Image (cartoon, rainbow, N blue to C red):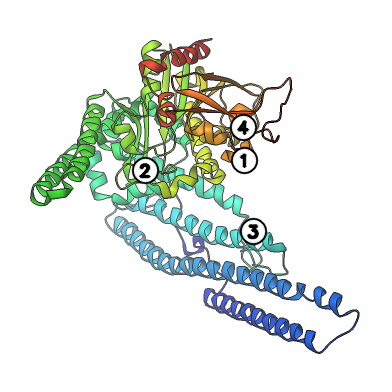
Amino acid sequence: MTLVSLSDIPTVEIDPSALSSAAESLRNHADAVADSSERIATTWNSLTGSYDAPEAAELLSRMTVVPQAAEDFAEATRRISSIMAQLADQLALAHAQETSLRAEVESFREAVRGFRASSDDMGLGSSDDTWGPGQFLRNQELISECLSLRTLRDTAIDEARSDLASIGRADIVVPSAEDAGGSAPALTGWVAEYDAAANGVGLAILAKLSAGSPEDARALLAAHDDWRRLFETTPPDATAVNAWWTQLAASNPGALDALVLGASVIVGSLGGVPPASRVAANAVNAKNRLPSVEAEIRRMQEMSRAHGGPDLLAWKDVIGRLERQLDYLQRAADGDVQLYLYEPESQSIIEMIGTLDENTSDVITYVPGTFTSVHSFYGDQVQQVGRWLNIQDSRVVTFVWKEGLFPGEDVANGGTDLSRIFEANDENVAVEKGRLIADFQHELLLSSPEAKAAQQDGMGHSWGLAGITSSEVAGAQYRQVHSLSGAGMPSGWTSSPDTEYFHWAYTDALSIVQGTGTVWDGHIPTRDPAFDSHLYGREGDFSIYLPNGTTAGAIVISPEPPPKLPLTTTPIDNHNLIASDNPDNQTTLFDILREIQR
């Protein structure tokens, strides 16, 4: 590998201070335009008392557009100023990183030259491939940091240019690296080079961790927390990881133990690693978390005894949540719960239900609904349908998916945050989750031949359907999509001719609100012909007939019945029932299973 050099470090050609000053000046001028506009409007409006002519009214009405035009101009100028100020901040950060990186590269090059010189002095000889302890990996890290800095700089500039263009393509140009006189290739080229470097660094670290025992791997990670952070922020490409992992499994399968058992904190979240290995790594992660959860339970118990009083029930609730978490993690450590992903700090968890093998017929990506938190998994609230299906047919494997915050989720207590409920009707939130779901499917299929050979199905409860259909927009493909009282689909979604769509529901709180047309702008399963809808009756269902606009007492003869609104006395219970293994839901579950097996 070539020794990193100062020429590898990208230069920030734009002066962040000058750009920041220009942004502030532009904002001041925008404020001045707004002030002048107000004075003009005030002066012009005062003419009504002294200017009286036939054309006065029309002239004065036409002048009313001036203040609004001036305000529009001032607002656009403020937006430009804001974009420039943000770019200045990002370039200032890049400039600071450039300065620091130059010092680090100079120092590192001197250290490498020193080691090679001492190697020559001792008669050992040296070459461009001679490295001291840790220098090879450090060289890769510095090259990666150079590429990361270039990406930071060019991305900031490109985003600023795009944001400025969206205002109306004003005659304002932010130079790229090439415009500023640099010789950097296009951003896409650097992205490709950066990805290649990130893959090289990541795979080199994996090779180092797999070279010894699990204890050796743990010791290395304890000494190099930066390796863990590197995988957390810039993991190698899943395809590259899977190719490397497959080769290692064939040539030295025992080395995988060092990674799974000793580097579980990396392997448990690493795309491209086969599901069974990720589950085994997360069993280790779960076991490692048990002592801290137990300690927290003891601490809460002591606090409840000391400060219980009227808040005793609240303390019991907190302790109950911790005990459920402890039980869940113990089951994961014992292998009774299979965690494909477990990152509670980012509110992310994916549980695999069933065994992927050559007999697997269906792989279901199941996305639960509004208010789902990691505590929903601890309490076995969102896995019931997947477990029921697997009990009935062991060939059906379900991945219950949650990455990041869900709409209405209260991170603090695992309950509901009604101030965030409107996110369930926000298309941008669903589209963002859809990209993550599509990425999950991509990584799963490339890392598991068994999953790839099976039929892919999507299933979403309530808001979860928005996530599933948004994943289709992002490139995920399913043979069947099942809506369990699904909320809706994004505007960019269209049904696939290769996919069967089903909607299963009871009359519930969501369906009642959907009847008003306010949920997902009416883009809901029951109004889309692609969905084969099944609405099941329940005790407590009833309907009210809506007014038809005729006067009271009038007799109307019509072949069409008046419009009606289906209602129920148990709207919340019915909404939760469809996603449960409750005996009252068995008919629906068997109907769903029949379609999956068909």
Horizontal side, residue 75 vs residue 40: left or right: left
Residue visible at 54% across and 49% down?
A: 193
Q: Amino acid at mark 1?
A: Asp
Please report whichever mark, 1 or 2, sits nearer to the chain's N-terminal start: 2
Label 3 sits on a secondary structure element that is helix
Q: Earlier in the sequence, mark 4 or mark 2?
A: 2
**Callout 4 touching callout 2 (CB < 8 Å):** no
Q: Residue 199: in sight, yes or no?
A: yes
Would residue 354 be seen by someone viewing this image from the given angle?
Answer: no
* Vertical side of 86 occupied by 405: above or below: above
Give whichever of discs 1 and 3 has the lower sequence position.
3
Q: Position of residue 195 (x, y in %)?
A: 50, 46
Q: CA distance from mark 3 to mark 4?
A: 50 Å
**Marks 4 and 1, how far apart in space?**
21 Å
Label 3 or label 4, whichever comes before in sequence order? 3
Answer few, some or many: residues within 10 Å of disc 4's Cα (few below 14, many 20 plus, some between 14 and 19).
few
Residue under label 1, please give it: 521
